[in-house]
Image: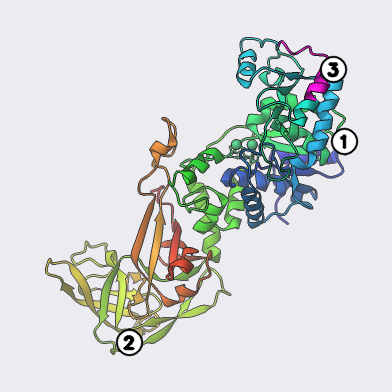
Amino acid sequence: TAPERRDFIRDMIRSDLANRKHDSIVTRFPPEPNGYLHIGHAKSICLNFGVAQEFGGRCNLRFDDTNPVKEDIEYIEAIQEDVKWLGFDWAGEPKYASDYFETFYGYAVHLIENGKAYVDDLSIDEIREYRGTLTEPGKESPHRNRSIAENLDLFARMRAGEFPNGAKCLRAKIDMASGNINLRDPVLYRILHARHPKTGDTWCIYPMYDFAHGQGDALEGVTHSLCTLEFEDHRPLYDWLIENLPVPARPRQTEFARLNMTYLVLSKRKLIQLVKDGHVNGWDDPRMPTIRGLRRRGVPAAALRDFCERIGVTKSDTLIEYPMLEFCIREVLNKTAERRMAVLDPIKVTITNFPEGETDWLDAVNNPEDPDGGSRKVPFSRTLYIERDDFMEDPPKKFFRLAPGREVRLRWAYFVTCQDVVKDADGNVVELLCTYDPATRGGDAPDGRKVKGTLHWVSADHALDAEIRVYDHLYGRPDPGAEGDPLDDLNPDSLIVNTAAKLEPSLGEIPVGDAVQFERLGYYCMDPDSETLGKPVFNRTTGLRDSWAK
Ligand code: ATP
Ligand code: MG
Ligand code: MG
């Protein structure tokens, strides 16, 4: 069994269970379907679904679909897919705040009947103005003391569609002088003549998040409503509503710090802008911090879960360094990704003593970290490619790769010695003439002779031409937006496309989405564009080691 995880939320749950406050726990993950999930949501997903699993409880997926103007079925479907891809499943059917609209309406009427809510005619701007500031109490609306009968009538007419958007709203009657601005008669319902993805034209008034959220929790029997710190100030309102409504349960809200990461902007609104304005190629662009972007980039779900576990859950804001994510990716991929050979910047090598037209099929181990990983055949022939920077005509002493007169090992194949070079008219080396030692087949010399360098290579006749997409951070600074608009910080070189790459033939059979390690280069995964472009396209997931730490 896994070691017991400790953090302030799990400690609270342990003690609630030990004290018999609850027989079992219920959590929920409550996305608003107004965009795609990002790595910040992954933290919340791993927490909510994770604690439900660990403590034998359940976790609901509840769409917080209270703002029809920004919400869409497309997002509802994508969110379900992403949660499942991350490795979690919800209890029963997905839930929707809109499932409870009729009940919420009844709760609002209940407040009115008890003199705890009123219909206001002030505009949203006026309400904001009347609300006051941290140092200054708010001002009461002139409509605050309408009779219960008048409020009931007006609220019914709001529902019936008698008033245009913004003409009226329903507000809780709490305290305009409260030290907590959220308690200064918060808006509970607004008029919005908009078609809702689930309820269509049934409603033209919609509950505010604060009115829907806690009541949705209560209706679902949620015991622990875990949300991010910006809702801490809303908790008194959450509790006020629970206390003043005939709800079937008393959920408790607990806040934790949201995920912030260097080089990333985690806000659906800003991510939408990147997509809409064409700064990236869609929600699943491998540069996006969305779950589908990370997935397309080749990040395994297990690495994201491990990342969320390692960063932990705290009560105060932290900034996670991006390389932490790459560390988690490498941890998983080093164990699971099969090794292959690819040459990204090829230079031609002719093995002058290897017979023309012949192929020697060599055994190559798929994954030295996985004893069950098996092996594959790699073709060796007279014409090969190696990386241009694995050769130097006039190398320094510590250069252990190929140079005139030097011998190296070609991975899984033979020792080769560079005998001569061919140059073009400008004096650039365009081809290396080498000899191989047939006795070293498989990579060892029977006479015990050692070489210092082992190079990756591919056979020219058998190689696949490929497109390799190499990604850098989408933003050119670790704190995008720190000096204004994050769009001004976009990194112009965040995508570099390489169409010169040559791959060993077995790379044509890698399933889309599967990660491989290109030996000595990094982790890559086959992009779905391979199918449409009719050639292998690989995304670079991450390098083999932390290039920022150096
Ligand atoms: P955004 O600001 O990106 O639009 P949001 O909080 O409005 O995010 P929701 O769809 O309401 O997005 O989020 C669903 C859940 O995910 C909420 O409980 C929210 O607190 C949580 N969440 C969102 N962003 C983060 C984050 N960066 N770190 C941890 N949890 C997050
Ligand atoms: Mg939200
Ligand atoms: Mg938001």
Q: Work out whether residue 23 or residue 211 is closer to the camera in this orientation and state it.
A: 211
Q: Is residue 57 magenta?
A: no
Q: Position of residue 128 (x, y in %)?
A: 62, 18
* Kind of residue indicated by mark 2: Pro
Residue 434 circle label: none
**Relative depth, front residue between 366 and 106:** 106
Residue 174, image quadrant: top right
Mark 1 C-beta to ligand 1 under 8 Å: no
Q: Are there few (<14), some (14-19), or many (20+) residues within 10 Å of tag 1? A: few
Res 452 → quadrant = bottom left
- State the SS at label 2: helix
Number of numbered discs visible in the structure rendering: 3
Residue at the spot of label 1:
248
What element does badge 1 sit on?
loop
Q: Which contiguous range is marked in magenta?
A: 142-155
Q: Which residue is mark 2?
A: 438
Identity, as a three-letter code, of the amino acid under mark 1: Pro
Circle 2 or circle 3, nearest the eye: 3
Residue furthest left in the image: 425
Q: Is residue 150 magenta?
A: yes
- Report the mark closest to the observer, 1 or 2: 1
Q: Which residue is mark 3?
A: 148
> In the rendering, at what x and y percent does residue 366 appear?
50, 74
